[in-house]
Image: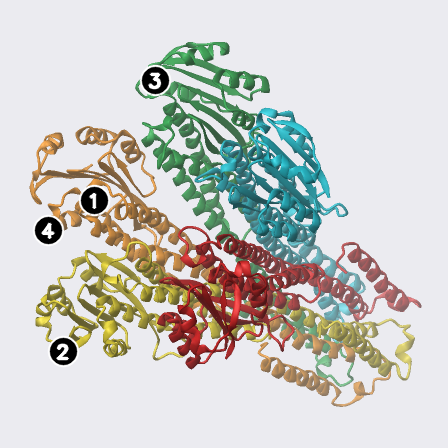
Chain colours: A green, B cyan, C orange, D red, E yellow
C-alpha cells in the first residue's frame, strides 16, 4: 500500500509524484525521492525494484520479511532492516507486537516499507520538511531520521520493563503470591529478550556507520549516526542490567520460596505439637488401669483439661517467642 | 554411489559424462563439471581424488566423515563440510539425525559427497540449470547454492524448536506434570545444541568468505555468501535466544516445583488438622475420669460429634479462605 | 544556575567574568575560560551554546540528561558525561542517588553542568588554582581534574559495598535470619549494578583518551588520564569480584536454607517421636481386653508412666547424640 | 631413559647412533637426528642440552614437568609441551592419568621426552619411516606426526565422555538412584575438565603455527598443522557441548530430586490419611458417653470396622486416581 | 625502612652506598643501582623520588598503596605493582594476607618498595649476584628476577587451593556435615578470588612486555618475561579450572542436601508408620462396643500385641528392602 511518494529538491518538497515517474526524477540532479510503503504486495515491490533498480537479494529479504535488524551495503546503496515494537492491542500484560521496517537508501532516494506496524513515519517526514537545511544533506539524513524515530520508540518500552522489574522487586520480600511473582519475572524476561532482539543487532549495524570505513551515503552525517549509536548502547546497557537483575531476582525468589516453605513447616509443627500433646494426655487418662487415683478425684477431669490447656499455653508462648507461630 | 555427473559450458548442461572422462572435461576451457556422490565407498572416493586431483588431507576427512562444519582452502580449491539435520524417521519426539555433506570446489568443478542424508540436491541442480546466467558464474555460485539449500533446511527445525519452547512456556504455570515439562525442556536443549553444532561453526566459516581476503573461487559471489551469512546469523541469534529462555525456563520450573511442594505441604497440614483435632476431642471424652458430667448427658454423644464437626467446619472455612485447601 | 565563571591566563585567574563576555575572552590568545553551572535551565544552556559555539547534539544531550557516561569528540572539542553517586539523604539502607555532570571541553574552555548532584567542584577549582604550572597545560588538565575528582568519589562507595559483602559473609553461616540476609544481598547487588553502570562505560571512554589516536585536547596529559583509567579499572575489577562473590553467596544461602530446613525437619521428627510413642503405649493400655493382667497391678499405672518416660529418655539421648535435637 | 636415537638422511634412516655423536651428525648437511627419551634424569637431559644446544629455560621446563600445553619459539627452534591422557590402570571409573610429552624441535632434529606416559611413539616413527617422501620434509613433519598422534589419542577419551553423558541422560528421568547419577555427573565434569586442560591451550598454540607469521620450521607443513588444528577445534567444540549439557543435566537433576521429594510427600500424606482417619473413628467409638446407642448394636463392632475399611477404600481409590499413591 | 642499597658494575657489586650518593652513581656509565625499601615513610619515598627522578604519579601510587597489579611505562622507565600473598600468621583456615611490592625500574636502577609483606627479596639479590653474566644485562633482568620470585610464590598457594578442592570433593558424597562442606567451598572461593585478583591483571600486564612493542628496558630479556608470562597463564588456567569445579561442586552440594532431605523424609515416614499403625490397632481394641468377642478371649491381649508387632515387622522388612530405613 503506497503511503507517500514525493520528490524534493534542495531540501524542499517539489511535489507528490506518481510511482511511474520516480526513475525520471532520480535522473535529475539534486533531486531526491522519498517513498513510503506499508504492508506491500509483491507487485508493488517489483515495481519499486524496477524504478529504483534495487538489488534482487535485498528485494527478496523485504518480500519475505522476518529478518533480523541489519544494515547491508549494495554498491552505493544501503538496505536497512529495523524492528518496531508496539504493545499488543488486545492484551494488557505488556506483550509486544514485533513489526518490521525495511529501508532502501540510495544516493538520492529513500524507500521505506512497513510490515505489521501501526505507527508510520509521518512525524519523521514533517520534521525533515520543517528543517530544509538538514534535508538538503540528502538521503543520509533521512535514513538517520527514520532510524532515530524507531530507536526513540524503544525508550518507553524500556521504561516499562524497568518499572516492571521495580514492581517485582518491591513485592519480592513481602511473602505473598510467589507464583504470580515468578510468572511476572518470566514474562518480563520474554519481553526483555524481544527488545534485545530488536536493538542488539541494530547497535552492531549502526556501529559500522560510525567508525572505520563509512558508506558514502552517511559521510557528513557521522555525528547523527553516532548519536543513534549512543542511544542504542544506552538501551543495550540497560537491557544487560535488567537481565542480570532478573536472573538474580529469580534466584532470590527460589530462596524466598524455600524460606517460606521452611517457615510453614515450623508453623505446622508448632500447631501439630499443640494438638498431639493434649492427645497424649487424654490417652494416658484413657488407660484402663484399676489403680489410677486421679480418675476418682472429684475435680480430676477439670484438672486434666487445665493441664492440657496449661501445657498448650506454655508451648504457644514459647513458639511465639521463637517466631514459629 | 554416483548420483549425478554432468559437464556444463557457459551455464548450460553439455551432457552426463562417465567418471573416467572428468579429467578431460576439466582441461577444456569454460567447461565446468559437477558431480554428486552419496554414501561413497573408499574406491569411488579414490577415483574422484585422482580425476579431480584432490588434496589427500581433504579426501581423508571426507572418507572418515564426522567432521564439524568448516571451509578449508587448499591452494585454489575449497573443501567444505556441512551438516544436514533431518527428523529421525522412526521417532516422534523430534530427535534429529545428523548427516554430512562434503563439497570439494575447484575453479571449474564441484564434487559433493552426502553421508547419512536422505534428501539430495536435485532441487539445487534444477534451480541452477534454470538460471544459466548465474550458473555461468561458475563453481562459486554452485557452492553458494548448495550451502544456501542446506541452510534453508535449518529454518523449519528452528521453527519447531521455537514452537516447542512456546508449548513448554504455556504449560509452565498450569501446575500439572512438572516431570514431563522438565523432560521436554531437556530434550529441547539437546536438539538445540545439535542445531547449534551444525550452524555456529558454519557461520564462522562462511564469514571468512564474506569479509577480508576472499578465496578466488568466491570473488563475484560475495553478496550471495553475505546473504547466507545473514541467514546463519539469524539462526544463531535465535538459538542464543532460545538457549537463554530455556535456562530461565528450567530455573523457573524448579521454582514452580518448590512452590507446588510448598502448597501441597499446606494442603496436607490443613487436612491433617481436620483429622487430628477431632481425634483429640474423642481422646478427651475417652478418658476414664469418674466425674465427667457430660458423659451422662442424654445428648452428650451427639453434642460431641457436633463439636467435632463444628470445629472442622470452622477450620475448613478458614483454610479455604487462606487458600490452603 | 551559574555557580562560577572565570577567565585564566598562563595558569592564573584573571577575573570572574560575566557570561556575555565569554566569547570575547575565548578570542584572546592564551586565555582560558572555566564555567560551572548547576541544574541548568534551557535558557542558560542556550546562552552557553551560543557563547561557546557548542554542537547542537551535545547541547541536546546535556538538556535531556539521563545519559550514560561517555566521551564524545566534536571536531576539536569533547563532550563528556559523568555520573555522580551520592547516598540518598533520607534513607539509611545505602541507596544511591545518581546525578550527572556534563562537561564541554574545548581548546580554551571548560563548561561543566551538574544535575541532581549536591557536591560541586570547588575543591577541583581550588586545587587547579593552587598549581598554576599544571593549570597552564590548559583545558585537558582541568578535564582530567574533574574526572579524577568524580572517580575518587566512587571509592568510598566501593568500600561500603565491600564491607556490606563482608558483613553478609560473616552472618552467612550463623543460621539466623536468612530472610534479612537474602534481602541484604539483593540490595547489595542493586547498588553494585548502579556503581557498575557509572564506572564501566566511563572506563571504556577514558581508555580511548589513553591509547591510540588521542584527541588534541588531551595530548600532553596522557599520563594523567592513564592514572584515571587505572583507578577505573581497579574499581571495575573490584566490582567484578564482588559480583562473583555475591552470586556465590546467594547460591550458598539457598544451600543454607535447604540445610536448615533439613535440620528443622529432623528436629521436628525427633520431637514427634517423643510424643507419638507414649501415645501408642497409652493406647495399648487403653484397650478393653478383659484379660490384661497388668491393668490390675497395684503399680501398673506408675509403671506405665515410667515406661513412657524411660523410652522417651532413651530416644532423647539418642537423638541428641545424632544431633537431631 | 633413552628409548631411541637415530639419524636420517633424505627421509631414510642412516643408523642408530650413540648420544655422543649427535652433535657431529647435526653438523652434516641434510642429516636429521631424532631422539626419544622417557622419564628422563637430570643428567640425561643435561647431556642432551649440550648436544643439541637447547635453551636453558626450555630445559628447565622439561626438567620440572607439569607444564600446561604450549608451543614456544626459541630463535629457530620450537619447544612444545603436550599432555597425554591415559585411563588410570587400577581404577574402573574412567579416571584419567595425565602424562606429559616435551618436544624440542630444531631445523634438523627432534628430541621428545615422555613423562608418566605408558604409550610411546614407536608407531609414529614407523609411520614416518614408511613414508620417506614426507620424512624428507624434515623436523616440521615429524613434529606434526607426534602432535597428530597425541591428538588422535584424545578422541577415544572424548567418545567415552560422550557416552557417559548419554548414559547419564538415559537414567535421568527414571527416578532411581539420584545420588549415583549426581556422582557420575560430577565425575564426568572432572574428566571433562582434565581433557579441556590438555586440549584448549594446545589448540591455541597450534593455531599460531597455522595462521599469520609461522616459525621457519613449520613452513611447508601448514596444511598438516591446520589439520591438527581442525581436530583440536572439533574436540574443543565437543567439550563445550558436553559442558553445557552437563550443567543443564545437573540443574535438571536438582529439579528431579525436588520433584521426587514432592511425590514422596504426597504418597506419605496419602498413607498417613489411610491410618489417621480410622484412628479418629476408633477414638470416637472409644468415648465413654453413656448414651451411645451404636455401642449396643449386635453388629456395631463389625459395622465400625467396615466403616473404617470403606472410608479407606474410597480414599485409596481417590488417591490412586490423583496419582498420589 | 631501607633494606638494601647497593651499586653494581658489569654484573658485580661495587659497594653498599648511602642514599645521598645514588644520583651520582646513576650518572656513571655501566653503573647500576639497586635499592630495596620496606614499609616506606613518605619522607623516604620523597628522597628516593628526588634521587631517581621518579614520576610524581607513580610515587603517589606507591605512597597510597592498595593498587591492583599493573606495569606502567613512564618515558624510559617502568612502574610495576605486584601483589604478594602470604598465609595469615594467626589463623589456620588458610586466609591470605595481601601485601604489595612496587618496583620502579629505570635504565640503570631498580627501586623496590614492599608493603605488608614479610618475605623480602634477599634470595633474588643473592641469585642475581651469583650470576654476573645475567646481572650484566641490567635492570630488565633484575625486574624479571623480582617478578619471577613473586610469581613462584603463588604456586604453593595454588597447590593448597587445589588440594582444598580435592578434600571437598572427597567429602562431597559421604553425606556428613553438609554445612561444613559448604562453608569450606565458600571459603575456598574467597581465597581463589584473592589469588585471581593478584595474578589476572599481572598476566595481562606482563603480556605487554612479551609481544608487540616492548619497553626499551626489557629488550634482550624477552624470553625471560615470556617464561613468567607462561607461569602466570598456567596459574590463571588452574584458577579458572578450580573456579568452574567450585561452581559445579556448590550446585552438586545443593543437590546432595535436597537428596539427603528427601532420604530423611522417607526414613521419618517409615518410622512414623511403625508407630501410627499399632496406635490405630490399639484404638480399635479400645472401642467400647458391647459385642467385641475378641475382648473376651483369654489370649486376646497377647494376640493384639503380636498383631501390632507382626505388622511392624513386615513393614520394617519392606521399608528396609526399599532402603527407606
The residue carrying mark 2 is: E16
Residue A130's tag is 3
Q: CA distance from mark 3 to mark 1?
A: 39 Å
Q: Circle 4 marks a residue in which chain? A: C
For marks 4 and 1, give the one nearer the viewer: 1
The residue carrying mark 1 is: C218
Q: Are marks 3 and 4 in contact (CB under 8 Å)?
A: no
For this view, does B298 lie left or right of residue D20? right
Q: CA distance from mark 3 to mark 4?
A: 50 Å
For marks 4 and 2, give the one nearer the viewer: 2
* Visible residue check, residue E321: yes
Residue C131's tag is 4
Looking at the image, the residue that sits furthest to the bottom is C298
For marks 3 and 2, give the one nearer the viewer: 2
Q: CA distance from mark 4 to mark 1?
A: 18 Å
Who's the residue at 27% across and 76% down the image? E124
What secondary structure is found at the residue carrying circle 2? strand
Instruction: Assign the C terminus of chain C to one quadrant of the image.
Output: bottom right
Is label 3 on the same chain as label 1?
A: no
Instruction: Assign the N terminus of chain C to one quadrant of the image.
Output: top left
Q: Circle 2 marks a residue in which chain? A: E
| Sequence-earlier tag: 4 or 1 | 4
* Visible residue check, residue E251: no
Q: Nearer the viewer, residue E231 or C6?
A: E231
Vertical relation: D164 (above or below) C225: below
Q: CA distance from mark 3 to mark 2?
A: 81 Å
Amino acid at each position: 500500500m503506497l503511503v507517500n511518494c514525493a520528490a524534493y529538491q534542495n531540501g524542499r518538497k517539489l511535489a507528490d509524484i506518481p510511482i511511474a515517474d520516480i526513475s525520471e526524477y532520480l535522473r535529475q540532479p539534486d533531486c531526491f525521492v522519498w517513498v513510503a510503503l506499508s504492508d506491500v504486495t509483491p507487485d508493488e515491490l517489483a515495481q519499486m525494484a524496477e524504478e529504483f533498480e534495487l538489488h534482487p537479494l535485498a528485494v527478496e529479504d523485504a518480500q519475505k520479511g522476518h529478518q533480523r535488524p541489519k544494515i547491508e551495503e549494495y554498491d552505493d546503496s544501503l538496505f536497512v532492516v529495523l524492528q518496531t515494537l508496539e504493545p499488543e492491542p488486545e492484551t494488557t500484560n505488556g506483550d509486544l507486537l514485533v513489526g518490521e521496517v525495511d529501508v532502501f537508501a540510495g544516493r538520492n532516494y529513500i524507500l521505506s516499507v512497513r510490515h505489521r506496524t501501526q505507527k508510520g513515519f509521518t512525524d519523521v517526514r514533517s520534521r525533515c520538511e520543517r528543517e530544509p537545511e538538514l534535508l538538503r544533506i540528502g538521503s543520509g539524513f533521512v535514513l538517520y531520521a527514520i532510524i532515530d524515530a524507531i530507536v526513540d520508540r524503544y525508550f518507553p518500552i524500556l521504561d516499562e520493563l524497568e518499572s516492571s522489574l521495580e514492581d517485582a522487586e518491591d513485592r519480592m520480600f513481602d511473602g505473598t503470591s510467589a507464583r504470580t511473582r515468578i510468572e511476572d519475572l518470566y514474562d518480563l524476561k520474554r519481553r526483555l529478550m524481544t527488545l534485545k532482539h530488536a536493538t542488539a543487532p541494530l547497535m552492531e549495524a549502526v556501529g559500522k556507520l560510525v567508525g572505520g570505513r563509512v558508506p558514502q551515503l552517511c559521510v557528513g552525517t557521522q555525528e547523527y549516526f553516532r548519536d543513534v549509536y549512543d542511544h542504542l548502547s544506552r538501551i543495550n546497557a540497560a537491557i544487560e542490567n535488567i537481565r542480570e537483575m532478573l536472573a538474580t531476582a529469580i534466584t532470590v525468589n527460589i530462596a524466598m520460596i524455600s524460606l517460606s516453605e521452611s517457615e510453614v513447616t515450623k508453623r505446622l509443627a508448632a500447631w501439630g505439637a499443640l494438638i498431639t500433646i493434649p492427645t497424649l494426655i487424654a490417652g494416658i487418662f484413657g488407660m484402663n488401669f484399676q489403680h489410677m487415683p486421679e480418675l476418682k478425684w472429684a475435680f480430676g477431669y477439670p484438672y486434666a483439661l487445665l493441664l492440657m490447656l496449661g501445657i498448650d499455653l506454655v508451648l504457644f508462648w514459647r513458639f511465639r517467642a521463637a517466631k514459629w507461630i
